[in-house]
Image (cartoon, rainbow, N blue to C red):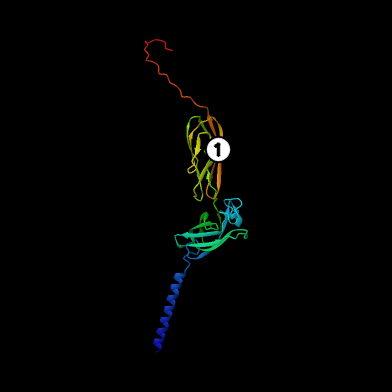
Amino acid sequence: MTAIVYIRRLTALLVSNLILLMLLGCGGSGDDGNGAAGHSSRLALTLTTAGETLNSRQLGSVSTARAEPGDQDFVTLIKIIVSADDIDPPIIEFFEVPKNGEPTVTVELSVLNGKNRKITTLFFNEKDVKINEGQIIIDLFEDKRVKMEVPSCIPTITNPGSQSDFEGDPVALQIEAKSPIDLPLTYSADDDTLPPGLRIDPADGKISGTLLAAGTYVVTVTVSDDGPRTASTAFKWTVKPFRPPIDIITPEDQSNFEGDAVS
Protein backbone atom coordinates (compact mmCIF):
# COMPACT_ATOMS: atom_id res chain seq x y z
CA MET A 1 0.00 0.00 0.00
CA THR A 2 2.83 2.30 0.80
CA ALA A 3 4.23 1.92 -2.70
CA ILE A 4 0.81 2.65 -4.24
CA VAL A 5 0.33 5.78 -2.10
CA TYR A 6 3.81 6.94 -3.08
CA ILE A 7 3.07 6.44 -6.77
CA ARG A 8 -0.23 8.33 -6.48
CA ARG A 9 1.46 11.26 -4.72
CA LEU A 10 4.25 11.35 -7.31
CA THR A 11 1.70 11.29 -10.11
CA ALA A 12 -0.27 14.16 -8.52
CA LEU A 13 2.93 16.19 -8.12
CA LEU A 14 3.89 15.63 -11.76
CA VAL A 15 0.41 16.63 -12.92
CA SER A 16 0.52 19.76 -10.75
CA ASN A 17 3.90 20.75 -12.14
CA LEU A 18 2.69 20.15 -15.67
CA ILE A 19 -0.35 22.37 -15.12
CA LEU A 20 1.88 25.07 -13.62
CA LEU A 21 4.20 24.96 -16.62
CA MET A 22 1.23 25.21 -18.97
CA LEU A 23 -0.13 28.22 -17.09
CA LEU A 24 3.24 29.92 -17.17
CA GLY A 25 3.55 29.25 -20.87
CA CYS A 26 0.10 30.66 -21.66
CA GLY A 27 0.28 33.51 -19.23
CA GLY A 28 3.79 34.74 -20.05
CA SER A 29 4.31 38.33 -20.99
CA GLY A 30 4.64 37.69 -24.72
CA ASP A 31 6.44 41.02 -24.72
CA ASP A 32 7.80 42.04 -28.12
CA GLY A 33 9.78 44.92 -26.68
CA ASN A 34 6.87 47.35 -27.10
CA GLY A 35 4.85 46.62 -23.96
CA ALA A 36 2.50 43.95 -22.70
CA ALA A 37 1.05 42.40 -25.82
CA GLY A 38 -2.38 40.89 -25.28
CA HIS A 39 -3.12 43.39 -22.51
CA SER A 40 -5.30 46.48 -22.72
CA SER A 41 -4.67 50.11 -21.85
CA ARG A 42 -6.95 53.04 -21.11
CA LEU A 43 -7.25 55.54 -23.96
CA ALA A 44 -8.51 59.03 -23.14
CA LEU A 45 -9.52 60.78 -26.35
CA THR A 46 -9.94 64.56 -26.23
CA LEU A 47 -11.69 66.03 -29.25
CA THR A 48 -10.37 69.33 -30.59
CA THR A 49 -10.90 71.65 -33.51
CA ALA A 50 -8.37 74.20 -34.74
CA GLY A 51 -6.21 73.26 -31.77
CA GLU A 52 -8.82 74.25 -29.19
CA THR A 53 -10.49 71.95 -26.68
CA LEU A 54 -14.16 71.52 -27.42
CA ASN A 55 -16.99 71.95 -25.02
CA SER A 56 -20.42 70.76 -25.99
CA ARG A 57 -21.35 74.11 -27.57
CA GLN A 58 -18.12 74.33 -29.57
CA LEU A 59 -18.43 70.73 -30.66
CA GLY A 60 -21.87 71.50 -32.01
CA SER A 61 -20.46 74.58 -33.70
CA VAL A 62 -17.74 72.96 -35.80
CA SER A 63 -19.45 74.20 -38.94
CA THR A 64 -21.69 77.06 -37.77
CA ALA A 65 -20.65 79.79 -35.38
CA ARG A 66 -23.62 79.52 -33.00
CA ALA A 67 -25.20 76.10 -33.26
CA GLU A 68 -28.01 75.57 -30.76
CA PRO A 69 -29.75 72.41 -29.60
CA GLY A 70 -32.11 71.48 -32.41
CA ASP A 71 -29.88 72.90 -35.16
CA GLN A 72 -28.77 70.44 -37.83
CA ASP A 73 -25.11 70.95 -36.89
CA PHE A 74 -25.50 70.51 -33.14
CA VAL A 75 -23.76 67.28 -32.08
CA THR A 76 -25.61 65.12 -29.55
CA LEU A 77 -24.00 61.70 -30.07
CA ILE A 78 -20.44 60.52 -30.71
CA LYS A 79 -19.67 57.06 -32.09
CA ILE A 80 -16.10 55.82 -31.70
CA ILE A 81 -14.77 52.83 -33.64
CA VAL A 82 -11.37 51.30 -32.83
CA SER A 83 -10.09 48.82 -35.39
CA ALA A 84 -6.85 46.95 -36.14
CA ASP A 85 -5.71 43.68 -37.70
CA ASP A 86 -5.84 41.98 -34.28
CA ILE A 87 -9.05 43.67 -33.06
CA ASP A 88 -11.90 41.61 -34.46
CA PRO A 89 -14.64 42.63 -34.21
CA PRO A 90 -13.84 46.37 -33.90
CA ILE A 91 -14.52 48.16 -30.62
CA ILE A 92 -17.60 50.37 -30.92
CA GLU A 93 -18.62 52.82 -28.20
CA PHE A 94 -21.33 55.51 -28.09
CA PHE A 95 -21.15 58.69 -26.00
CA GLU A 96 -23.88 61.26 -25.49
CA VAL A 97 -22.74 64.88 -25.56
CA PRO A 98 -24.15 66.96 -22.68
CA LYS A 99 -25.99 70.02 -23.93
CA ASN A 100 -25.03 72.25 -21.03
CA GLY A 101 -22.19 70.76 -19.14
CA GLU A 102 -18.72 69.40 -19.40
CA PRO A 103 -15.98 71.96 -20.16
CA THR A 104 -14.24 69.47 -22.45
CA VAL A 105 -15.31 66.52 -24.55
CA THR A 106 -13.05 63.66 -23.47
CA VAL A 107 -14.07 60.04 -23.86
CA GLU A 108 -12.30 57.06 -22.30
CA LEU A 109 -12.25 53.45 -23.43
CA SER A 110 -10.17 50.30 -23.04
CA VAL A 111 -8.17 49.26 -26.11
CA LEU A 112 -6.02 46.20 -26.76
CA ASN A 113 -2.32 47.07 -26.83
CA GLY A 114 -0.56 47.10 -30.19
CA LYS A 115 0.44 49.13 -33.21
CA ASN A 116 -1.69 50.90 -35.81
CA ARG A 117 -4.87 51.35 -33.80
CA LYS A 118 -7.23 53.20 -36.14
CA ILE A 119 -9.67 55.41 -34.26
CA THR A 120 -12.64 56.71 -36.23
CA THR A 121 -14.97 59.22 -34.59
CA LEU A 122 -18.43 59.91 -36.05
CA PHE A 123 -20.63 62.81 -34.95
CA PHE A 124 -24.43 62.73 -35.12
CA ASN A 125 -27.13 65.31 -34.51
CA GLU A 126 -30.30 64.67 -32.53
CA LYS A 127 -31.95 63.16 -35.62
CA ASP A 128 -29.12 60.58 -35.84
CA VAL A 129 -27.81 62.14 -39.04
CA LYS A 130 -24.02 61.98 -39.40
CA ILE A 131 -22.65 65.48 -39.79
CA ASN A 132 -18.91 64.98 -39.38
CA GLU A 133 -16.16 62.46 -38.79
CA GLY A 134 -12.45 62.31 -37.96
CA GLN A 135 -9.76 59.63 -37.91
CA ILE A 136 -6.30 59.04 -36.41
CA ILE A 137 -3.92 56.05 -36.18
CA ILE A 138 -1.86 55.48 -33.00
CA ASP A 139 0.37 52.90 -31.31
CA LEU A 140 -0.85 51.96 -27.83
CA PHE A 141 1.19 50.09 -25.19
CA GLU A 142 0.28 52.00 -22.03
CA ASP A 143 -2.44 54.33 -20.75
CA LYS A 144 -2.47 57.31 -23.06
CA ARG A 145 -4.20 60.66 -23.58
CA VAL A 146 -4.64 61.64 -27.23
CA LYS A 147 -5.99 64.77 -28.90
CA MET A 148 -7.95 64.28 -32.07
CA GLU A 149 -8.70 67.21 -34.36
CA VAL A 150 -12.20 67.24 -35.78
CA PRO A 151 -12.22 68.29 -39.46
CA SER A 152 -14.44 71.18 -40.47
CA CYS A 153 -17.75 70.52 -42.23
CA ILE A 154 -17.57 73.78 -44.19
CA PRO A 155 -17.16 73.43 -47.98
CA THR A 156 -14.00 74.73 -49.62
CA ILE A 157 -13.89 76.64 -52.91
CA THR A 158 -10.83 77.37 -55.08
CA ASN A 159 -10.33 80.87 -56.45
CA PRO A 160 -9.78 80.61 -60.24
CA GLY A 161 -7.73 83.81 -60.38
CA SER A 162 -8.26 86.93 -62.51
CA GLN A 163 -9.78 86.39 -65.96
CA SER A 164 -9.25 88.43 -69.14
CA ASP A 165 -11.14 87.99 -72.40
CA PHE A 166 -12.56 89.96 -75.32
CA GLU A 167 -16.15 90.91 -75.89
CA GLY A 168 -17.67 88.22 -78.07
CA ASP A 169 -15.37 85.46 -76.82
CA PRO A 170 -16.94 82.13 -75.77
CA VAL A 171 -16.19 81.14 -72.17
CA ALA A 172 -15.96 77.83 -70.26
CA LEU A 173 -14.54 78.26 -66.74
CA GLN A 174 -14.83 75.49 -64.12
CA ILE A 175 -15.17 76.53 -60.47
CA GLU A 176 -13.74 73.84 -58.16
CA ALA A 177 -15.29 73.19 -54.72
CA LYS A 178 -15.53 70.28 -52.27
CA SER A 179 -17.56 69.23 -49.27
CA PRO A 180 -15.38 67.61 -46.54
CA ILE A 181 -18.31 65.38 -45.65
CA ASP A 182 -19.22 64.60 -49.27
CA LEU A 183 -22.54 66.43 -49.42
CA PRO A 184 -23.87 67.61 -52.80
CA LEU A 185 -23.05 71.25 -53.51
CA THR A 186 -24.98 74.07 -55.20
CA TYR A 187 -23.19 76.92 -57.00
CA SER A 188 -24.40 80.48 -57.51
CA ALA A 189 -23.04 83.89 -58.55
CA ASP A 190 -23.93 86.59 -56.03
CA ASP A 191 -26.11 89.51 -57.13
CA ASP A 192 -25.69 88.83 -60.84
CA THR A 193 -21.99 89.66 -60.67
CA LEU A 194 -21.17 87.62 -63.78
CA PRO A 195 -20.41 89.55 -66.99
CA PRO A 196 -23.47 89.77 -69.28
CA GLY A 197 -23.90 86.68 -71.42
CA LEU A 198 -22.54 84.23 -68.85
CA ARG A 199 -24.28 81.83 -66.47
CA ILE A 200 -23.13 79.37 -63.82
CA ASP A 201 -24.44 75.82 -63.71
CA PRO A 202 -25.79 75.36 -60.15
CA ALA A 203 -25.02 71.63 -60.21
CA ASP A 204 -21.39 71.50 -61.38
CA GLY A 205 -20.09 75.08 -61.07
CA LYS A 206 -19.15 75.62 -64.73
CA ILE A 207 -19.38 79.21 -65.96
CA SER A 208 -20.18 79.33 -69.68
CA GLY A 209 -21.62 81.54 -72.40
CA THR A 210 -20.50 84.35 -74.70
CA LEU A 211 -19.24 87.68 -73.35
CA LEU A 212 -21.60 90.45 -74.48
CA ALA A 213 -20.34 93.66 -72.87
CA ALA A 214 -16.90 95.13 -72.23
CA GLY A 215 -16.03 96.19 -68.71
CA THR A 216 -14.40 95.11 -65.46
CA TYR A 217 -16.47 92.84 -63.22
CA VAL A 218 -15.89 91.51 -59.70
CA VAL A 219 -17.48 88.06 -59.66
CA THR A 220 -18.48 86.44 -56.37
CA VAL A 221 -19.25 82.74 -56.49
CA THR A 222 -20.87 81.01 -53.52
CA VAL A 223 -21.13 77.27 -52.91
CA SER A 224 -23.49 75.72 -50.37
CA ASP A 225 -24.48 72.27 -49.14
CA ASP A 226 -27.81 71.29 -47.64
CA GLY A 227 -26.59 72.24 -44.11
CA PRO A 228 -26.76 74.98 -45.11
CA ARG A 229 -23.01 75.65 -44.94
CA THR A 230 -21.50 78.08 -47.44
CA ALA A 231 -18.16 79.28 -48.79
CA SER A 232 -17.46 82.11 -51.23
CA THR A 233 -14.67 83.43 -53.40
CA ALA A 234 -14.32 86.61 -55.49
CA PHE A 235 -12.20 87.33 -58.57
CA LYS A 236 -11.87 90.01 -61.25
CA TRP A 237 -13.02 89.45 -64.81
CA THR A 238 -11.86 91.96 -67.42
CA VAL A 239 -13.76 92.01 -70.71
CA LYS A 240 -11.95 94.06 -73.36
CA PRO A 241 -13.79 95.76 -76.25
CA PHE A 242 -14.73 93.71 -79.28
CA ARG A 243 -11.72 92.58 -81.30
CA PRO A 244 -12.59 92.83 -85.04
CA PRO A 245 -11.30 90.05 -87.23
CA ILE A 246 -8.17 90.84 -89.22
CA ASP A 247 -8.72 90.74 -92.99
CA ILE A 248 -5.77 89.30 -94.88
CA ILE A 249 -5.56 90.43 -98.52
CA THR A 250 -3.87 87.92 -100.73
CA PRO A 251 -1.73 89.70 -103.36
CA GLU A 252 -1.74 88.72 -107.02
CA ASP A 253 1.06 86.59 -108.40
CA GLN A 254 4.26 88.62 -108.80
CA SER A 255 6.98 88.46 -111.46
CA ASN A 256 10.35 90.22 -111.33
CA PHE A 257 13.85 89.98 -112.71
CA GLU A 258 16.96 89.21 -110.76
CA GLY A 259 18.34 92.48 -109.45
CA ASP A 260 14.95 94.31 -109.42
CA ALA A 261 14.14 96.47 -106.39
CA VAL A 262 10.91 95.42 -104.73
CA SER A 263 8.76 97.47 -102.32
| Residue 139 visible to an observer of this rendering | yes
List x then y, in percent, for residue 177. 51, 44
For residue 159, above or below residue 20: above
List x then y, in percent, for residue 129. 52, 56
Q: Residue at x 43, y 80 (%)?
A: 13
Front in this rendered view, residue 91 or 94: 94
The kind of residue on which mark 1 rests is: Asp
> Which SS class for mark 1?
helix
For residue 27, above or below residue 193: below
Front in this rendered view, residue 14 or 239: 239
For residue 230, above or below residue 101: above
Residue corresponding to mark 1? 192
Q: Residue at x 44, y 78 (%)?
A: 16
List x then y, in percent, for residue 240. 53, 29
Front in this rendered view, residue 99 or 38: 99
Asked whether, in this view, residue 73 is left or right of residue 25, the answer is right
